[in-house]
């Protein structure tokens, strides 16, 4: 009834009897314990444990028909450990927790009161900006693991961090970096006016649902405008991040340089983040696949900026 499994095969409900450091034969006896939450799984994966022995008579067994998305998340977590140290990952999780109350207030105020919590948004951006490049990179990587109810929160956080990294890579002054980070943080604020059902729907949207979703840039723009405190750059990012370079985007079908520069940056970060993210229902595209798809999406992006993103952010290894 005892089975040895790789640490990335651990699931909630498994009963662990032994943990093994660094491979076979290097067994550490521990009190047997039940994996109660995904946090338990993460803690073990962030340690030096390579394999564990589970007792399938006392807990969940290795489900070989388990859905691939769960395996995606687990193997992604394992891959993180090949790129970052356990401490860097832990620090990224800590940063996310530090930002959480502020960003959640921004999202909740938008959802419940349809208003923009400017002060909370600015605190959140300062906290994201305060990290080093390694912190920022790890933060983006960790934020890719999204639970269903955290999708908007973590997407906003990751796009903000990407905008900050990209703006710094382009050599912008820190005041401009801050504006771009703020724009990334609130770019999808209008989605808070949409129902939970639409936001979390994994199947194809109906025509009327699609219409509602396509209204989110304007809704966000109006919400932020009403506060009267946000700079033009932030409003532009909110309203125009779904415009396409060839004029086929929405809501105003702007084209080329008529699309504000900051919104052209945001479009790249937004799509890259969405493609490379792990979701419960889909696998993430690799960096190379995502860039390939974006490069082969003629008319969508400002090609010069996309090339800069690839060379300064992706190839340079700023993000993994
Ligand atoms: Fe959006």
Image: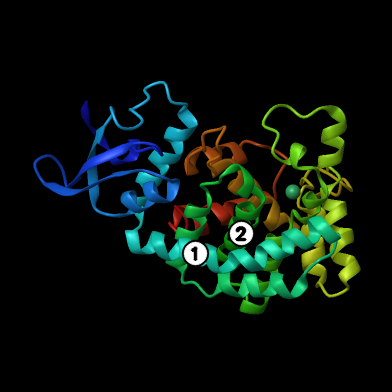
Closest to the camera, between mark 2 and mark 1, is 2
Give the side of residue 155 with respect to residue 314, left or right. right
Q: Nearer the viewer, residue 105 or 295?
A: 105
Q: How crowded is mark 2: few (under 14 residues within 10 Å), some or many (20 or more)?
A: many
For the point 87% across and 36% down, which residue is it? 211
Give the side of residue 207 with respect to residue 138, left or right. right
Q: Which residue carries the number 1 mark?
A: 136
Report how many numbered discs are placed on residues in the image.
2
Query: Do residues under tags 2 and 1 come within 8 Å of each other at their CB atoms?
Result: no
Q: Check disc 2 and report its element: helix, strand or loop.
A: helix
Q: Which residue carries the number 2 mark?
A: 157
For the point 61% across and 49% down, which residue is it? 150
Tell me if residue 259 can be seen. Answer: no
Ligand 1 contact, mark 2 (Cβ < 8 Å): no
Name above or below for residue 205 compared with residue 131.
above
Ligand 1 contact, mark 1 (Cβ < 8 Å): no
Q: Residues within 10 Å of mark 1 (few under 14, many from 20)?
A: many
x and y percentages locating residue 139 in the rendered image: 49, 60
x and y percentages locating residue 283 in the rendered image: 51, 34
Q: Check disc 1 and report its element: helix, strand or loop.
A: helix
For the point 78% across and 67% down, which residue is it? 233
Give the side of residue 279 with respect to residue 21, left or right. right
Q: In which quarter of the image is residue 206?
A: top right
Answer with mark 2 or mark 1, whichever residue precedes in sequence.
1
Q: Which residue lies furthest to the left in this view?
A: 25
Tell me if residue 113 can be seen. Answer: yes
Q: Nearer the viewer, residue 262 or 50?
A: 50
Q: Quadrant of residue 85?
A: bottom left
């Amino acid at each position: 009834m005892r089975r040895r499994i790789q640490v990335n095969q651990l699931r909630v409900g498994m009963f662990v009897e032994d943990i093994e450091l660094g491979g076979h034969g290097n067994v550490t006896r521990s009190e047997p314990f039940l994996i109660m939450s995904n946090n338990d799984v993460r803690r073990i994966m962030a340690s030096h444990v390579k394999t564990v022995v589970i007792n399938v008579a006392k807990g969940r067994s290795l489900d070989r028909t388990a859905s691939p998305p769960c395996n995606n998340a687990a193997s992604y977590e394992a891959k993180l450990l090949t790129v970052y140290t356990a401490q860097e990952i832990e620090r990224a999780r800590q940063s996310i927790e530090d930002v959480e109350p502020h960003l959640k207030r921004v999202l909740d105020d938008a959802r419940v009161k349809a208003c923009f919590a400017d002060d909370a948004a600015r605190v959140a951006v300062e906290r994201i900006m305060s990290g080093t490049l390694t912190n920022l990179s790890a933060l983006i990587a960790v934020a890719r693991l999204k639970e269903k109810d955290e999708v908007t929160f973590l997407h906003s956080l990751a796009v903000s961090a990407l905008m900050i990294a990209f703006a710094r890579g382009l050599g912008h002054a820190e005041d401009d970096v801050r504006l771009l980070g703020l724009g990334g943080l609130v770019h999808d604020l209008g989605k808070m006016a949409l129902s939970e059902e639409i936001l979390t729907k994994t199947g194809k949207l109906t025509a009327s649902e699609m219409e509602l979703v396509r209204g989110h840039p304007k809704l966000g723009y109006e919400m932020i405008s009403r506060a009267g405190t946000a700079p033009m750059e932030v409003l532009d990012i909110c309203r125009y991040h779904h415009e396409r370079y060839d004029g086929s985007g929405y809501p105003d079908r702007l084209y080329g340089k008529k699309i504000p520069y900051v919104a052209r940056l945001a479009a790249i970060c937004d799509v890259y983040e969405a493609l490379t993210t792990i979701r419960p229902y889909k696998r993430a595209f690799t960096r190379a696949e995502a860039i390939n798809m974006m490069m082969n999406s003629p008319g969508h992006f400002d090609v010069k900026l996309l090339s800069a993103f690839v060379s300064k952010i992706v190839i340079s290894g700023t993000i993994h």
